[in-house]
Image (cartoon, grey):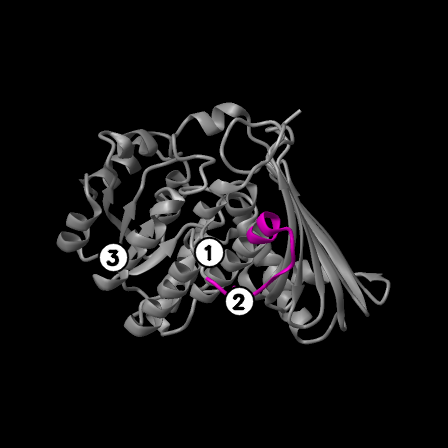
Amino acid sequence: MAGKILRVALIGCGRIAAKHIMAITKKNSGLLLCAVADTAPGAFDKVFDSCKLSLKRKHQIKKTVKTYAGYHEMLDREKPDITSITAPSGLHYSIAKAAMLSGSHILLEKPMSMKASQARELRDISEQTNRRIAMGHIFRYFPVVGNLQKDVAAGRFGKISHGSVIVRWGHDQAYYGQASWRGTWKHDGGVLMNQCVHAIDLICWLMNGNAIAANAMISKRFHDMEAEDIALGTLKLDNGALCQIEGTTNSPPGDHEAAFYLLGEKGGFRMGIRRGRPYFDIRINGKKKNLEYFMKEIRSRGLSSLLSLTNPHAGIYADLRGAILNGKYPIADAKSGMMSVESVLALYLSAKEKKQITIPLAKDFSSQEMSEYSFGSMS
């Protein structure tokens, strides 16, 4: 079983698809890219050309890949072991449902869906069909993160006081202008749903809790789009800890940063990535533990794990493949996708209704219902 090759089909050839193609076709991945579907003619060729592969390797890969205009036909004909979904967010639910019901496991880019009930339904279908869902929550696959989460859960950092997450992932107006769905409430959402959802997933996972209440304010300051480009919020977790959230796409596009902080009775840590460079500061009982955690990472996952920042999607695929072959669940599973979506939707609903929102939501809610929200003047 360990040497079994799993066939992968890709739906959607946007910018993120290149990372998926590179991860799938990585040497010794145990995966074969068998098919690609996109409604735009030539979309696969365009994204494939952007992949950093030798001409010889590209020629080899292209010989095995069939292209389709529609994903239903592709699923029927190819019967892939894994379907990777990188289509616009508003299409995630319908494609993921069709793929699982056709018998395929899925790797689903964030967010899981744009509606709370749809996220729950996808989780339920996954359980009923015994099909695995691996979410594109890339931060869970970064070096050191997994060992930190285990130690927080084991009590090494003591009782958790609070945490915070900052996502300053700037985009210019051209980013939102390149596709009609970007920045829309129906198909994309704003900074919370697009840029912050996997950061919110990570901080809750690290804090060993699930969000049970949300408060938020949102605004639109610099961009011409439907949804928000700045959001501030707080989450209360079921273990009593609090989490502060800041997300914006208003920062300089060349200075992307995602930062995380956790404080416990016995210690805490700061970590993040800025301009592609990771940083860590881990302290327990006043003593710095960076080296200890780097050595623990190397022992548990090998030296190559420290290079996973170049394409964390390779880690997601390896984890999903192992989960399928060994009957386990991925690190970022269906529950993580459902919980992160519901947390974001609760933050949106809090901003809309100007009050604290309980999680799980008392009534169904979708990002599209934010279309009634008024930002007021941008001046």
Classify the position of the C terminus by image quarter: top right
Instruction: Specify which label sits upstream in the sequence, 3 or 1.
Output: 3
Locate residue 334, reporting x and y percent: 42, 64
Q: Nearer the viewer, mark 3 or mark 2?
A: 2
Please, what is the three-letter code of the amino acid marked with disc 2? Pro
36, 305: nearer the viewer: 36
Q: Quadrant of residue 212?
A: bottom right
Residue behind mark 3: 98
Q: Is residue 275 above or below residue 161?
A: above
Q: Is residue 304 visible?
A: no
Locate residue 249, reporting x and y percent: 59, 35
Can you tell which mark lies on residue 324? none
Instruction: Specify which label sits upstream in the sequence, 3 or 2.
Output: 3
Residue behind mark 1: 365
Locate residue 254, reporting x and y percent: 61, 28
Residue behind mark 2: 360
Spatial CA span between label 3 and label 1? 22 Å
| Residue drawn at point x = 31 percent, y = 72 percent | 130
| Residue drawn at point x = 27 percent, y = 64 percent | 4
Range covered by the magenta-colored residues:
349-363
